[in-house]
Amino acid sequence: MTLKLRLTSEMTAEEMAPLWPGIVRCLEKYCRKFDGYETIQNIIAECAAGKRQLWVITDGDEVILAAVTEIITINATGKKQLVMAECGGSRYAECLELFHEMEDWARAQGATEAVTHCRRGLVRLYEPMGFKTRSIVMTKEL
């Protein structure tokens, strides 16, 4: 099959209905991996409110990846960034080829930069797409 990327806010309720089980499965996978940082309920609420965008990648009728983005504006400069926030599912490396469509959409919204926070293992996948490491984020429980 051919992979297809779709922005859910451009889909009808009828188009979305059969995709929900797959979307939830993908978001659950993300939320389990980053437990304590995000919930499915919050992601869906913020996407429904228009604060963030929910993208789905399908292979035929099967949702294989759900990605969440957000356009933010840097207060100091007014620069708009596409934040590639959460992404869960399977066949991640194969799906990356479609991310340029998210970038094209963001460019049309006025974004001039894309940024993502990812696990160290994904750096090797993002670098060929033009991403450069600017910082490493480390956390510690207090």
Image (cartoon, helix red, strand yellow):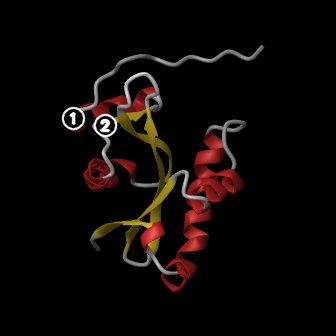
Task: Name the residue rendered at 69%, 38% in the picture.
Answer: 35
Q: Where residue 100 sits: x, y (%)?
A: 25, 50
Task: Name the residue rendered at 67%, 36% in the picture.
Answer: 37
**Which residue extends farthest right?**
142
**Helix, strand or loop under label 1:** helix
**Helix, strand or loop under label 2:** helix
Question: Where residue 68 is drawn, which disc sits there?
Answer: none
Q: Is residue 67 left or right of residue 32?
A: left
Q: Is residue 141 above or below residue 83?
A: above
CA separation in Å, label 2 and label 1: 6 Å
Residue to which mark 2 is pinned: 125
Q: Is residue 45 left or right of residue 130?
A: right
Quadrant housing residue 82: top left
Quadrant housing residue 17: bottom right
Quadrant the N terminus occupies: bottom left
Task: Name the residue rendered at 37%, 24% in the picture.
Answer: 77
Q: Where residue 45 sits: x, y (%)?
A: 66, 58
Q: Where residue 26 sits: x, y (%)?
A: 55, 58
The amino acid type found where label 1 is placed reads Pro
Q: Residues within 10 Å of mark 2 (few under 14, many from 20)?
A: some
- Do the residues under discs 2 and 1 have CB atoms within 8 angstroms? yes
Quadrant the C terminus occupies: top right
Q: Residues within 10 Å of mark 1 (few under 14, many from 20)?
A: few
Which of 126/82 is in front?
Answer: 82
Task: Name the residue rendered at 25%, 52% in the picture.
Answer: 104
Q: Is residue 132 above or below residue 68?
A: above
The amino acid type found where label 2 is placed reads Leu
Q: Where residue 108 sits: x, y (%)?
A: 27, 53
Quadrant housing residue 22: bottom right
Q: Is residue 89 above or below residue 83?
A: below
Residue to which mark 1 is pinned: 128
